[in-house]
Amino acid sequence: MFHVELLVAIHYLFHVEHWFLQNMFPEYDIIIVGAGHAGCEAAHAAATMGSKVMLVTMNMMTIAQMSCNPAMGGIAKGQIIREIDALGGLSGIISDKSMIQFRMLNKSKGPAMWSPRTQNDRMLFSKHWREALEKNPNIDMWQDMVSEILIENDSVIGVKTGLGMEIRSKSVVLTNGTFLNGIIHIGEKKFGGGRTAEGPATGLTEQLIKLGFESGRMKTGTPPRLDGRSINYALIEEQKGDEIPGQFSFLKKYNLHKQRSCYITYTNSKVHSILKTGFEKSPMFTGRIKGIGPRYCPSIEDKINRFAERERHQLFVEPEGWDTVEVYINGFSTSLPEDVQYKALTEVKGFENIKMFRPGYAIEYDYFPPTQLNHSLETKLIKNLYFAGQINGTTGYEEAGSQGLMAGINAVRKINGSDPILLKRSQAYIGVLIDDLINKGTEEPYRMFTSRAEYRILLRQDNADLRLTKLGYEIGLASEERFNQVKEKNLNIKKLTNDLKHKKLLPQDINSKLTEINSTPIKEKTSIYQLLKRPELDMEKVAELDPDFSGYLAKYNPEIIEQAEIITIYENYIEKEQKLVEKVEHLENFKIKDDFDYGSIKALSAEAIEKLSKIRPKTIGQATRISGVSPADISVIMVYLGR
């Protein structure tokens, strides 16, 4: 009798536990898997737009962790952060709140190349992101590993976790970063992990492959972290922030009253010789690493192997925060044995007495070629399932954050029965990024560069709010305060630009000053608008020519003055690029049906048939950007469509 009662009790407890596991959570609109930069932006966007969000992460202590360098922005990446901010995302605001240094890169070049960059306090960055997410009442969090997605009728309906929890939702966004079957390499040692001291995520890759997804392996790496107290800063070059520091966000003003400097030092032939002694144990050179690494951010061993003629390589010494002595050695990414790393570092100028906190390492992880996605970042195979970030083969916080933002936005709109938001290449760097991924795919970690954007004069970092905030406001992400600020800014730019055209200066008033600065004297009354087109003049110098104009400018803030100046100086280039956009984008109006049979067109090349049938472009414009589809193929399709 006792045994029967025991069995009944066990049976009852089993069913209670099963019921608890299945019913602990309500049904969510969207589940975000992973709380890195992509996951955080996705969660914030979806929740702010009104959806009920569950954010599942393997470790709530590492939300928005800066896994690699403690910095945001840089060449082209700074433009992306400005765009995220303009749409209503949080990366810009969080970067500003946690920055310890600000620099505008490429100021010696034209404004299309100017790129903001912040050095950040690693711990503050993560702290501010977590606080922002926790303040949003539409976001719940759960610490666990997602091992499976739940599917019915080729549509995702939720996830299953390592603890056996089933959480239901209308949509799922996967932002797994480097955790999918991640393997960390240090010399001949290797162990599972998605980040140092954190385990890998297992199960998902295998399930997705069974569902018909293609997968691949990629590799990235990180440098050793050093004790800043053991660096002789007197021997290395100081790199200060801008005298008047800027910020990323167009909305809030965070005044940086003090800044921490970065520093520059160099490797040398002795460092290279020591590193070479570890090549026979290098996981990269011995073939133990199968994944392809980032072309534009190679490891130090790859640098000295590929560029053997160079006697030295630049290293950036970057502080990790206000209140820590830990420093990041940008340019010394490596997976060589730790003793080789340490010995080589002691031969670097300023590092003679160096102490290491932890060695650099390489990490291999699974990714899924992004040609398997629609432009909305929804997968083609499974409805309401979205991929964002390194799972799509990209590298970088900024690239990940922008994809997370767009996946979150489009998941909400799909649930609400609205069309997805698809940013054009002429509209945003984010549009360039996603269009490249969908049409061309990537076999190596994709990184954004200004050279990837054919309309970069239009896609400047300074005008991201003018390009995108209206859209962000209309979809319910950007605030009314932000939208009103942009409207006022736009009105002031137009007013100042118009006044520049009508304000004219007399020869007798300015010719002597023009001669002093080697500028040709004027022969008649000339507008300031025309004077600004001279390469030797800018707004500041014109203001020096005329005290009245200098006083007039004082009522405008620097952003308005800068915008009016750029519009004036680069007017012809901007107009030329806008005409090019109009010429090319008419092809986007030529729609192609989803079931179009490319195989029936005999005149198409075999490669074109294969690529077009796989990617399924929505328009002729998209088809022109698919790798392997030639202009001749496009002409054939257009003739076939009767265009």
Image (cartoon, helix red, strand yellow):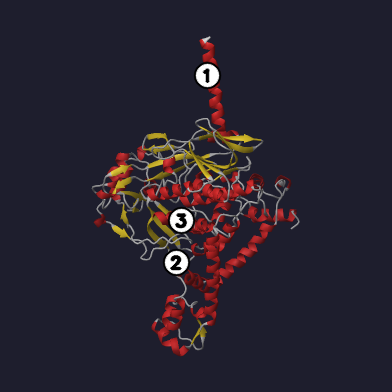
Residue 162 position (above or below residue 124): above
Q: Quadrant of residue 29?
A: top right
Q: Position of residue 585 (x, y in %)?
A: 64, 60
Name the quarter where the C terminus is drawn.
bottom right
Please state which of the two labelled residues, at mark 3 or mark 2, is closer to the viewer. Answer: 3
Task: Give x and y (percent) for residue 274.
Answer: 29, 44
The dot on residue 93 is 3
Left or right of 446: which side holds 66? Answer: left
Find numbered disc 1 in the image and state the secondary structure of the residue it sits on.
Answer: helix
- Give above or below for 12 relative to 263: above
What number is the disc on residue 10? 1
One can see residue 222 in this view: yes
Say left or right for 550 vs 48. Answer: left
Task: Indicate which disc, 3 or 1, sits on the residue closer to the N terminus.
Answer: 1
Residue ID for mark 2: 109
**Image coordinates for residue 475, horizontal then vertical, percent:** 60, 55
Q: Return the residue found at the far top.
A: 1
Residue found 55% across the figure and 21% down from its top: 12
Identified by mark 2, the residue type is Lys
Image depth: mark 1 or mark 2 in front: 1
Residue 584 appears at what percent x and percent y? 64, 61
Mark-to-mark CA distance, 1 and 2? 73 Å
